[in-house]
Image (cartoon, grey):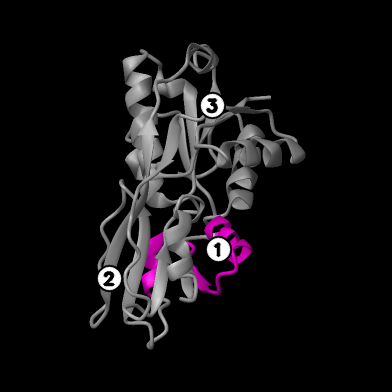
Amino acid sequence: MVPLVVIRPEPGCTATVSAARTVGLEPHGFPLFAVTPRSWQAPPPDNHDALLLGSANALRHAGPGLAAVRHLPAYAVGEATAEAARELGLTVIAQGQGGLQDVLGRLDPAHRRLLRLSGAERIALNLPTGVTMTERIVYASQAQPMPADLTALLAEPAIVALHSAEAAHHFSAECVRNGLRRARLRLCALGPRIAAAGGEGWGEVAVAADTSDRALLALARQMCQDPWGKTNS
């Protein structure tokens, strides 16, 4: 079976690898990012109507400041982030299927003042008319060099799971740095923007049906069963 390589940071990497095994894939986890918390100060509790969450990491690394805004309803980028929010006792109003910009199209009319908890690397958003947004950076992802074991694995055909545009950019750069042939490698991405961030020249680039790990692994399984790389692109 063609191996599936997972490069997202922990603890997500281990979770994806474990889920991949349960659906019969041959996963290999190589986290290419180390996530660390950033110091931040929560705004006054009445200054905002809702939270905007683009990653479960924003919740894992928000620290004690999260307590001051936990009462706010939350909008989550996808299923994993929504689940992490609920586990912490937050009320999730809506979750997206195609990124945070998609989430902004689902806002309750009463939620006009948003507080975005994010990482240092984040996408710019186009806010709807009448909506304001305050940003707080609560974590940073430090890119890591590709280890020798991963370089050796990628010398042969493999499928690589991409969970963020930042990961796609970094993986692409590391392939260039290590002289790896892109045509041997196939990418399965959590969304179109992530797929585009990887650039060109790959054996295949396919996009999951939605922004859940379940959909990404279903796509990876389909790709494994289609060795000629005709899944979708």
Name the residue: 33% across, 41% down: 197
Q: Give the image quarter of residue 217.
A: top right
Residue type, label 2: Met
Q: Is residue 48 above or below residue 172?
A: below
Q: Is residue 30 above or below residue 156?
A: below
Q: Is residue 94 a member of the stretch shown in magenta? A: yes
Name the residue: 63% across, 25% down: 2
Magenta stretch bounds: 79-105
Q: Look at the numbered disc 2 and give the secondary structure of its residue.
A: strand
* Closer to the camera in the image, 98 or 55: 55
Name the residue: 36% across, 47% down: 38
Left or right side of 52 for 88: right
The residue to which callout 2 is attached is: 133
| Quadrant assignment for the N terminus | top right
Residue 186 image offset from top left, x and y in percent? 49, 31
The residue to which callout 1 is attached is: 85
Q: Look at the numbered disc 3 and give the secondary structure of its residue.
A: loop
